[in-house]
Image (cartoon, rainbow, N blue to C red):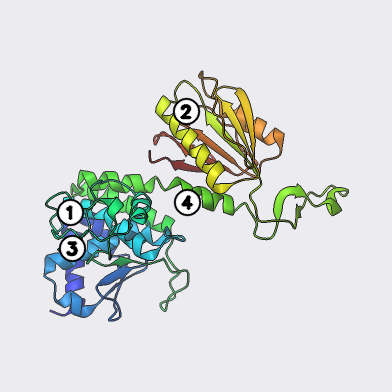
Amino acid sequence: MSAQSKMASARVSLVLDQPFFGSLALSLKFKEDTGCETAWTDGRSLGYNPTFIESLPHDRVTALVAHEVMHCAMGHPWRREARDSKNWNIACDYSINSELRDSGFTLPAGSLFPSVSGKSAEWHYARVQQNDKPQPNGNGNGQGQGNNPAQGQSKPDPLGEVRDAPSDIDADGDPAPTEQEWKQKAAQALNAAKMCGKLPGGLARTVKDSLKAKIDVRSLLLRFFSERCNSDYSWTRPNSRYVASGLYLPALESKELGEIAIGIDTSGSVSAESLSFARGTLESIIEELSPLAVNVYYFDSEVSSIDRFDKGDTLTWKPTGFSGTDFRPVLKAIEDDGTAVCAVIITDLEGPFPESCDLPVIWLSTDEQNTAPFGETVYLDR
C-alpha cells in the first residue's frame, strides 16, 4: 500500500473509532514531504515522509496522525514565540503523549512520556530548558515511569514535529488557520465525540484545560507588556511640545516599560495559597520585567491600601482587607491615579465588575470557573 493510501486509511479509522481525532484530521491537508524525517504539522498541513510511512503498520500511522492532530488541538503551532524550537517540540510531545497512550494509541519506541502528566507545553518547556540532557524512554506503550521533564531530551518524538503556524495564503487560496479557529474546531469535535460515546475522560479534561488557555504566566506577561511598550516611544511622560494644545502624546525617549498597576485580591474567598502565589507573581513582574514603577492595590470590597515601588526598590508584602470582593473601586482608583499604562489583577474573579475599563487589563485568575467580562483572562497553573 502506498504512503498516501496508508495516510487516508488512518484518517478513516480515526473518523470511525476516534471521532475527536478523526474530525480534526479532516481539517489538515496531507502532503508528501521527502525532506522531513518522519512527519510534521503547522496547523494547516500534515507533512509526511512517504518512505517512513510505508515502513509503519496501520496502527502506528493512525497514532502518528492523531499525534499531529493533537498538536493543533492544543494550539502548539501558535505558541512557541521566541522559544528554542527543539526544546519546544520536546515539551509539546511531553504534554500530549500520555493522553494519546491513554486514549488507546500504540506509540513507537522512543516516544516521550513525562513523569508529570496533565501539564501544558509551556510548563514542560521551562523544565526541559533547565537541563537539556537526553534520557530516552524506549517503551512506546508507556511501561515504567517515563521521562522526567526536568531532564530534557536530545531529539523530538519519532511521531513527528510541530512547526510554527504559517501566516500566508496557500497555493489553494486558503488563508492561514488561526489558533482561535482550531479552538473552535476542538470544542466542536469534543462535543461530537462525547455524543458518540467515544471520548476518553482524560482526553476530555486535557482539551478543556487547553481551551481555557492556561499558559505560562511569565511568557504571557512579557507579551502583554511588550505590546504596550512601543519600540520607538515611551509613555512614561507626555511630549511637552503638544501639552499646551491639550494633546498628550508620547515622547521619543526609551523602550522601557512605564508604570503599571497590580491589584491583589485580599477578600475572604481568596485562600492563603492563592495569596502566596500572588506574591510570587508580583515579585516576578518586578524582578523580570523591570517596569519604571509598580503601584500595588490591595483590595476586597474597597481599596484597603496602596504601595508604590520604583525601579530598584525592594518589595514589601503587607496585604490587608479580607472581606467581600468588588472590582469597581480598585479599577476606578487605578484609572483615577492616571499613571499606569496597564493593569494586572490577581484574583479568583468572585465579585461585581464595572461595565468597562479604559486601561488594558489582564486578569490572572486562581479559579478556573469564572471569566472577566472584559480584558484578558488567564487561569494560573499553580
Residue to which mark 1 is pinned: 101
Residue to which mark 4 is pinned: 219
What is the distance, in whole Å, between disc 2 and disc 4 at their CAs? 25 Å
340 relative position to 196: left or right: right
In the rendered view, would you say 77 is above or below 258?
below
User: Helix, strand, or loop for circle 2?
Assistant: loop
What is the distance, in whole Å, between disc 3 and disc 1 at their CAs? 13 Å
- Nearer the N terminus, badge 4 or badge 1? 1
Residue to which mark 2 is pinned: 350
Instruction: Give residue 110's mark.
Output: 3
3 or 2: mark nearer the eye: 3
In the rendered view, would you say 249 is above or below 63?
above
78 relative position to 259: left or right: left
What is the distance, in whole Å, between disc 3 and disc 2 at their CAs? 45 Å
- Nearer the N terminus, badge 2 or badge 1? 1
Along the line of sight, the residue nearer the viewer: 365 or 170: 365
6 relative position to 42: left or right: left
The spot of residue 70 in percent (x, y) is 29, 58
Along the line of sight, the residue nearer the viewer: 85 or 160: 85
From where the camera sits, is residue 5 visible? no
